[in-house]
Image (cartoon, rainbow, N blue to C red):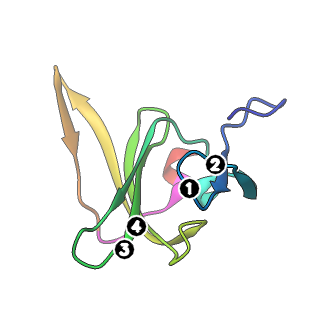
Amino acid sequence: MEDRAKNQTRTVLLADKITGPYRIVASGIKPLGMNAGDFDLVTSPDDGKGYMYFDRIHTEVICADLTYDYTSLACYCWLPIHFEEDRPVIEWRAEWSLDEYT
């Protein structure tokens, strides 16, 4: 969702059945405090743990562990991405700072 200030946010809805009815359990979520583009939610078939993969406006790929109730981020792995010619390049970094990208 996008709010009036053009911030991209997430809303978490919950229902007992896939057909609803749904209730909002969290809204206005900005993962890691940043605008985030497209995302995927993934559940591990082994232990049911949830993950959210998303991009930060086509500049980084982020894999975040979700909390047990899937409503917020527990921890994350941040992978800056850039392009060399037509190929995407994802760099692993042991340390980083958002100051490099603000």
Q: Nearer the viewer, residue 89 or 65?
A: 65
Q: Position of residue 67 (x, y in %)?
A: 52, 75
Q: Position of residue 30 (x, y in %)?
A: 66, 52
What amino acid is at disc 2? Gly
In this rendering, would 5 be left or right of 97?
right
* Residues packed near mark 4 inside 10 Å, few (<14), some (14 to 19) or many (20 plus): many
Residue at 56% over, 56% down: 17
Give residue 17's mark. Answer: 1
What amino acid is at disc 3? Lys
Residue at 51% over, 46% down: 101
Q: Position of residue 91 (x, y in %)?
A: 23, 52
Report whether residue 26 is seen: no
Disc 2 marks which residue?
20
Alpha carbons under labels 2 and 1: distance apart: 5 Å
* Residues packed near mark 2 inside 10 Å, few (<14), some (14 to 19) or many (20 plus): few
Alpha carbons under labels 2 and 4: distance apart: 21 Å
Q: Which stretch did the figure color magenta?
A: 94-99
Q: Are marks 2 and 1 in contact (CB under 8 Å)?
A: yes
What amino acid is at disc 1? Lys
Report whether residue 98 is seen: yes
Lower sequence index among marks 1 and 3: 1
Give residue 85's mark. Answer: none
Give residue 49's mark. Answer: 3
Disc 4 marks which residue?
50
What amino acid is at disc 4? Gly
Screen quadrant of the N terminus = top right
* Residues packed near mark 1 inside 10 Å, few (<14), some (14 to 19) or many (20 plus): few
